[in-house]
Structure formats: structure tokens, C-alpha cells
């Protein structure tokens, strides 16, 4: 997290001369918001702060049916819609998005994700049931995701098995069972960390862009065949219109005497 803070705050300072930037989050015709990259960034402990903000008392065993029912009831209480299947991971994600992510306009770390939400992250060394993971949010959107890699093949297999149950219940976002990966872990993986950042979102913030197409080299385009077909149809329509106009002009021309 310290490295992430230093890199992003230093980048903003180098580019703008300060730590505060203005961004038209609601469109160029609206007043811009201010985003303060002054370090250190705020830290939010996912479960602890969710309980404080929403006045909840979430069961400690998040893999239990009791926890699933509690979170489902909480979503119903706060009118937070969670489409089926209502797995514990999906319910928790909806609550976090509603209560915590909305607080993250300035750069904010959400830390200590539960194991059920982080199948590839290593368990927290001092907080059972949680993982050593953080996400950085800016302007209410995820900008960074990082965690200590799980390098125990036996625990990884169990995590995949748990994910498979959610996947079989209809959760397409749950991970598939990757036996090849588990076999590779058996050969050994040294202490490792993963870190990823959304360069496109960062570029949008730094350049005050409202559309992702403005900051990527190769934005999504329509297939060439579709574009070519539309061009041919348009040309055909133009030709027909021109022929019809010529016929009208010919019929309107008086005969030579």
C-alpha cells in the first residue's frame, strides 16, 4: 500500500504541481469534483467498517448458512437488490458497494477481504477468515487490486472447491476449479504478491476524460464486415435516391419544339 501511495501521489504531484486535481465526474457541463491524492490514503477495514456504517453484526463464520441468511436479510432491509444466486460473496459485495465504496471519492484502501471473496489470496496472518488483500478506490471506482498470493496447494484446492459450489448454483463470477494451477503449486511457489492497476481509469482521471475511448489506443470498434455492409447499404440507398431524382428531373423537362 505504501508503494501504491507513493507512486500515485508522486505522479499527480509531478503532473499537476499539487496533490488535488479536479475531475468532471458527472459530465463536462457539471461542476467538477476535487480528488485529493495527499498521502497517506484512507484505510477502510471491510468487515469492521461495514458493521459500523450499516450497524450490522455479521456472523464470524462467513461460510455458514447463518451468515448467508443474515446478509440476505440485510440487503432486503436496506433495499439493496442482489440478483440470484444470492451467495454470501455476492451479498457481501453488494453491501460493500452500497455502504463503503460510495465513501471512496478520495483515494481509499479497502482492506482485509474475507476468504470467500478472495480465492487466490493468502489467509491473513493475524485475522482468521480474512485475507491479506487490498483494493484502492478513487471516485467510487476500483483502481487497484493487490494481495499476497496463496501458495499452499491444499488450501487452494479447498478454495476452488468452495468456489465450484457457488458456480454450480449459477454464479458465473465464481472461479472454476483449476487443477493444473494446484499441481503447479505443489512444485513450489515462493512468497509472492500480485498487484494490478487500471491504467485506463487512472488516465481518465489524470486527463479529465469522461469516456474510456479517449484514453486507450485501440477502443472497441464495430466489426469491419458490419461496417462494410452498412456502407454498401448506404451507398445503394444514395444511388437509388439519385436515380429517382434524375427521373423526376427528366419528366419535368419540357419537350423541345
Image (tube, rainbow, N blue to C red):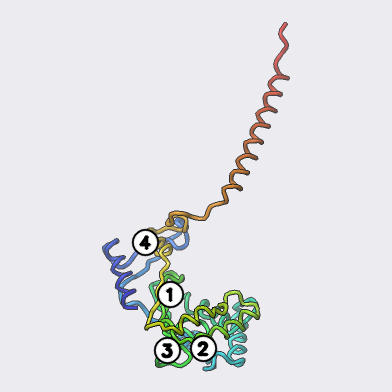
Q: Residues within 10 Å of mark 2 (few under 14, many from 20)?
A: few
The CA distance from mark 4 to mark 1 is 19 Å
Taking 59 as reference, is 37 above or below it?
above
Q: Determine whether 22 is above or below 68 in the image.
A: above
Q: Which residue is mark 1?
A: 145
- The residue under label 3 is 124
Circle 1 Cα neighbour tier, 10 Å, few/some/many (<14 / 14–19 / ≥20)? some
146 left or right of 59 in image:
left
Res 7 seen here: yes
Ranked by sequence position, the earlier of labels 2 and 4 is 2
Please say if the residues under marks 4 and 1 sit with CB atoms less than 8 Å apart.
no
- In percent of width and height, residue 133 lies at 42, 81
Q: SS at mark 2?
A: loop
Which of the 4 image quadrants contains residue 134?
bottom left
The C terminus - image quarter: top right
Residues at marks 2 and 4, CA–CA distance in whole angstroms: 36 Å
Residue in the image at 54% along x and 90% along y: 62
Q: Which residue is mark 4?
A: 206
Kindly report which numbered mark, 4 or 1, lies closer to the viewer in this rendering: 1
Residue under circle 2? 55
Tag in front: 3 or 2: 3
Q: Position of residue 1 (x, y in %)?
A: 35, 78
In the rendering, at what x and y percent does residue 34 appear? 37, 66
- Answer whether labels 3 and 1 touch (C-beta < 8 Å): no
Q: CA distance from mark 2 to mark 1?
A: 27 Å
Nearer-N-terminus badge (4/1): 1
Amino acid at each position: 500500500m505504501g508503494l501504491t501511495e507513493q507512486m500515485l501521489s508522486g505522479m499527480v504531484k509531478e503532473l499537476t504541481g499539487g496533490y488535488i486535481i479536479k475531475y468532471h465526474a458527472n459530465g463536462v457541463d457539471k461542476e467538477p469534483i476535487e480528488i485529493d491524492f495527499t498521502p497517506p490514503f484512507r484505510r477502510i477495514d471491510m468487515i469492521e467498517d461495514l458493521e459500523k456504517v450499516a450497524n450490522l453484526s455479521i456472523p464470524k463464520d462467513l461460510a455458514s448458512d447463518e451468515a448467508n441468511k443474515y446478509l440476505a436479510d440485510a440487503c432486503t432491509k436496506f433495499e439493496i437488490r442482489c440478483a440470484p444466486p444470492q451467495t454470501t460473496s455476492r451479498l457481501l459485495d453488494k453491501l460493500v458497494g452500497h455502504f463503503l465504496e460510495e465513501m471512496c471519492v478520495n483515494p481509499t484502501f479497502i482492506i482485509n477481504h474475507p476468504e470467500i471473496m478472495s480465492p487466490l489470496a493468502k489467509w491473513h496472518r493475524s485475522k482468521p477468515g480474512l485475507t491479506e488483500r487490498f483494493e484502492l478506490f478513487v471516485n467510487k471506482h476500483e483502481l487497484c487490486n493487490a494481495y499476497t498470493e496463496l501458495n499452499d496447494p491444499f488450501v487452494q484446492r479447498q478454495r476452488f472447491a468452495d468456489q465450484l459450489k457457488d458456480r454450480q448454483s449459477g454464479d458465473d463470477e465464481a472461479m472454476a476449479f483449476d487443477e493444473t494451477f494446484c499441481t503447479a503449486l505443489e512444485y513450489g511457489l515462493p512468497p509472492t504478491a500480485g498487484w494490478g492497476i487500471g491504467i485506463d481509469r487512472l488516465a481518465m482521471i489524470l486527463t479529465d476524460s469522461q469516456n474510456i475511448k479517449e484514453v486507450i489506443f485501440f477502443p472497441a470498434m464495430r466489426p469491419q464486415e458490419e461496417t462494410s455492409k452498412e456502407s454498401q447499404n448506404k451507398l445503394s440507398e444514395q444511388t437509388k435516391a439519385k436515380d429517382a431524382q434524375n427521373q423526376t428531373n427528366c419528366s419535368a423537362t419540357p419537350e423541345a419544339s
